Image (tube, rainbow, N blue to C red):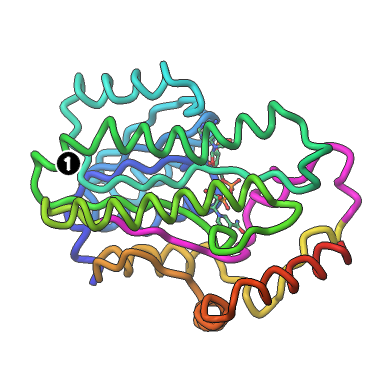
Amino acid sequence: MMNFFNNCTALITGASSGLGEEFCHQLAPHASQLVLVARRNDRLESLATHLRNLHPALDVRVFAADLTLPDRRHALADWLNDEDINVDFLVNNAGLGDHGHFDSSDWDRVQNMLDLNITSLTHLTHLLVQGMIVNGRAAILNVSSVAGFFPLPQMAVYSATKAYVTSFSEALAMELRPKGITVTALCPGPVPTEFFETATRPGDEDKASHFQTVPAFVVSPQEAVRAGLEAVVRERARVVPGPLLAAAVAVALMVPFCIIRRILAIRSAKL
Ligand SMILES: NC(=O)c1ccc[n+]([C@@H]2O[C@H](COP(=O)([O-])OP(=O)(O)OC[C@H]3O[C@@H](n4cnc5c(N)ncnc54)[C@H](OP(=O)(O)O)[C@@H]3O)[C@@H](O)[C@H]2O)c1
């Protein structure tokens, strides 16, 4: 199945940790070229060295960038052009959360989240999609979240950004399929990565229980990434990794929204 990715050139955002790093590991045995993007250059370089040692035929490139900055996104696209790198698999994975009430949120954190989860993902897709269409067969994988299906109190902005990512991906999948490009939204539930640490507000570190996760819904980064890549191969517009969570989401989406709203409000009052 993973033959689909043979000789591809994949660009992975947020490659310095968590799911992004795992995408690199799973794609490395198949791809001919990987482009690793995130802010932490030291992490990207050590991952690149590790991958080059494991897969000598693989061409691994690193581009350190804060993707919330439009200039850096343009610089990335220009650099790809100058280096003659034709991306045929774009993994828009970089993203972050902010946990807590909206009225007490720090605006800079909120702005950063909107810029990264929505604007950067959309802009990068816009910058690369024309080239992908010219290349012929290509794929885009946008990392969304189950949070995008439900308006989660205390994750209000994050949920809304992921609702955007899923909706954008679904519409784009329909637009681009006739042009030879598949678009998939990967919608994980809880995955143990640095995400929770990043989403915790300064001063809230001791509130260990503030993220309520159902242990049965937790999947490993390996499982989440595998599910995403398999969904790309199957040309699925969206996938929820983990059979239990996928079933729970499917059922919840059939429940009238007024009931979901009541459940979420009760859960929120207990937090
Ligand atoms: N973990 C979960 O439970 C979970 C569940 C559902 C969805 N997701 C989604 O999965 C994706 C990956 O998150 P993760 O769980 O792997 O968390 P993570 O380990 O915190 O990874 C986030 C990645 O985004 C990069 N990033 C953050 N700000 C950036 C910026 N301004 N410019 C460029 N890159 C930036 C980080 O790299 P640098 O800091 O080096 O820039 C890092 O590589 C996110 O979109 C997240 O919303 C996660």
Q: Position of residue 187 (x, y in %)?
A: 48, 62
Residue matched to label 1: 132
Q: Secondary structure at mark 1?
A: helix
Q: Residues within 10 Å of mark 1 (few under 14, many from 20)?
A: many
| Snapshot quadrant of residue 25 | bottom left
Q: Nearer the viewer, residue 191 or 187?
A: 187
Q: Position of residue 15 (x, y in %)?
A: 46, 42
Q: Ligand 1 within 8 A of label 1's CB?
A: no
Residue at screen point 28% across, 55% down: 183
Q: Nearer the viewer, residue 175 or 106?
A: 175
Magenta range: 183-207
Residue at screen point 49% across, 42% down: 94
In the displayed structure, would residue 35 be above or below residue 191? above
Taking the image as shown, residue 14 lies to the left or right of residue 133, namely: right
Taking the image as shown, residue 77 lies to the left or right of residue 185, namely: left
Instruction: Name the quarter showing ligand 1.
Output: top right
Screen quadrant of the N terminus: bottom left
Taking the image as shown, residue 125 lies to the left or right of residue 132, namely: right
Q: Position of residue 205 (x, y in %)?
A: 86, 46
Screen quadrant of the C terminus: bottom right
| Snapshot quadrant of residue 268 | bottom right
In the displayed structure, would residue 85 be above or below residue 9? above
Q: Nearer the viewer, residue 212 or 101?
A: 101
| Snapshot quadrant of residue 215 | bottom right
Residue at screen point 48% across, 37% down: 46
- Is residue 34 shown in magenta? no
Q: How would you classify the magenta stretch by its main secondary structure?
A: loop
Query: What is the three-letter code of the residue carrying label 1?
Result: Met
Q: How many numbered marks, from 0 up?
A: 1
